[in-house]
Amino acid sequence: MTNFRVTRIKPAFINRAVLAQVAADALAKLNPKSRDGKRWANAIGKAVAVIEQNPQMAYDLRTASLEIVGTRGTRYTANGICQCEAYNGGFPCYHRAAARLIQRYLEIIQ
Ligand SMILES: [Zn+2]
């Protein structure tokens, strides 16, 4: 069944300038002095690299969540929550950063 609410995120078609702007906006909103400020900055940086390279991503507009296959083949569904080790340890993760960046990105380009 085709789900029209799901957008495949294809690295080749990502507008890098828009993505860079979205990431810069997200970084500007961070408080570098907050407990996780540095970790979120790192997560955002990794998320940008992953969005530009990972062909296995899909964004579900209905649930505002990103399906992403990690480097070790694990599938995550990230929005405010995630299933990864970092999230379970109470830390920022790039999956959630990527979900938020793609949400903003799609708002801008659509
Ligand atoms: Zn995660």
Image (cartoon, grey):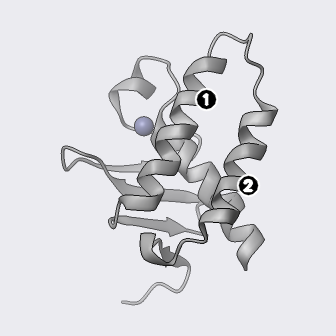
Residue 85: where, in percent of width, then height? Answer: 33, 26
Mark 2 vs mark 1, CA separation in Å: 14 Å
Relative to 47, is 9 above or below? below
* Residue on which disc 1 sits: 41
| Quadrant location of the C terminus in the rendered image | bottom right
Q: Residues within 10 Å of mark 1 (few under 14, many from 20)?
A: many
The residue positioned 56% from the left and 52% from the top of the image is 99
Residue 66: where, in percent of width, then height? Answer: 49, 57
Nearest the viewer among 13 and 82 is 13
Q: Is mark 2 within 8 Å of ligand 1?
A: no
Three-letter code, disc 2: Gln
Toward the bottom, the furthest residue is 2
The residue positioned 66% from the left and 19% from the top of the image is 37
Looking at the image, in which quadrant does ligand 1 appear? top left
Q: Which mark is residue 27?
A: none
**For numbered disc 1, what is the local secondary structure?**
helix
Relative to 109, is 77 above or below? above
